Image (cartoon, helix red, strand yellow):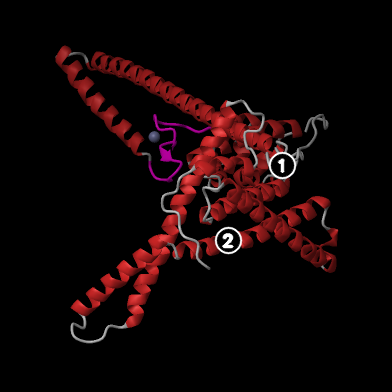
Amino acid sequence: MDGGRQQQGQGVADLPDLRLRVALAPVSWLWSQLSRGQQKVTARAVSQALDVLEGISSPEAAPQLLADRLTGRLQEVRGEALVREPMGWLLRRGLVQRQACSDRRCDDAIRLDTGADCENCANVLHIRRAWRARITAEVDAAMPGADPMARKAAIEERLRHRAELEAEDLMRSRQQAEAERARCQAVRAAAEARVQAEREAAAAAEAARQARPCADCGTAGSAGLCETCGYQRQTQALVEETILVAAAGAAGIGDVADVQAVTENVRGQMEREIAAARPQLLDLINTDDAVHDTPEQLASALAFTALQAVRQAADEYRSSVLRFLAHSPQAQTEAELAHAAELRKRRHQWNPDGETKPTAVHEAADAARWRTAQYLLDTRLQQLRATAEAATSKATEAALPKPRGRWAERLAPLAALPISDDPVRVDT
Ligand SMILES: [Zn+2]
Ligand SMILES: [Zn+2]
């Protein structure tokens, strides 16, 4: 070293990057001859060569492939000791891929990805031989009996020209391949950017949706409706539905006072159910370790409890109305028809002369009765809803400030609704 002017670099074994340690192992002595600055420059070239090799083969194989290349190049110069300029040799000879043909996986006629002989190179060699034979024949035809020296010069000249053309072709196809790669990369980058933008837009839209306040109580960050108000809306809807169900079963459906009474009765009953469920929940919460619940959680639990209570009451109303409709004249008639039909069928098919089994016949009659009850309820609910909707839209047309009036008001026009198949009330 010339007077310690340059800082001594580190050894290959001390390199932090394992890829570099593997790749540079065959030239560790050359590496130790480099100054620290030279090592930095060379390390960058090694990394670039490794990146290229990773693209051609695989990240695991790349360091060994580069090590093999360095070993091969050293054999050409008969060992590290005979390299006079370590960095220059590494950068310009040792690390450089020698693409002997147009295949980018070709290094000195060896395929980097398979390690086998490059077939493309073999083809090139074959083609060159064919060209030499052809050019020789052409020269012999053009210069019959020429002086051997002149003949040889003419052949060499034509071969040189041919080689130039091939080099141009190779250059052109490499440029085309490069342009194609760049185009693909641009397309891929654009697609990735689009996907990313779409993802961000979706995330922003979702965040905006989540941030929307509750439409009913105004609590921020409720995605438009908080949990408590959601339960309250369901409860309200179920109460209204149950009022309709009860109205569908009312005998005096053509009577305003009757419908009013049903409405108030159901509403009052629902309120009592909710009031009864409330202290039960509060008792439960006080004895439970849920005392740490926030006021919002408590409100939500109460709203849910109210919904549960209303659900139970609504089920009972529905069953009661179905029972009532199951004893209407229509249901009675359907049951009798089914009874007679089943009787005929059984007697005829299975037991022409004997007794029929009473249970099957009764089952058929019962099924017809309940089917008719359900049909009557569905039909009447449809009629009631249609009338209520018509009343609501009439109210909206009249530009009333409340598009959803109280049920009592909405049900009032139902008084005018003629239901031809009005059932006769029976004890349920
Ligand atoms: Zn090749
Ligand atoms: Zn709310």
Against 422, residue 175 (above or below) is above
Residue at 31% over, 15% down: 157
Question: How far across and how far down the image is residue 215, in percent?
Answer: 70, 37
Is residue 98 shown in magenta?
Answer: yes
Cα–Cα gap, marks 1 and 2:
33 Å
Is residue 30 shown in magenta?
Answer: no
**Eye-nearest disc, 1 or 2:** 2
The span picked out in magenta is 94-117
Other residues around mark 1 within 10 Å, as few (<14) / some (14–19) / many (≥20): some
Residue at 30% over, 34% down: 123
State the residue position of label 2. 317
Q: Is residue 303 visible?
A: yes
Q: Residue furthest bottom?
A: 354
Against 127, residue 155 (above or below) is above
The numbered dot on residue 404 is none
Q: Is residue 93 visible?
A: no
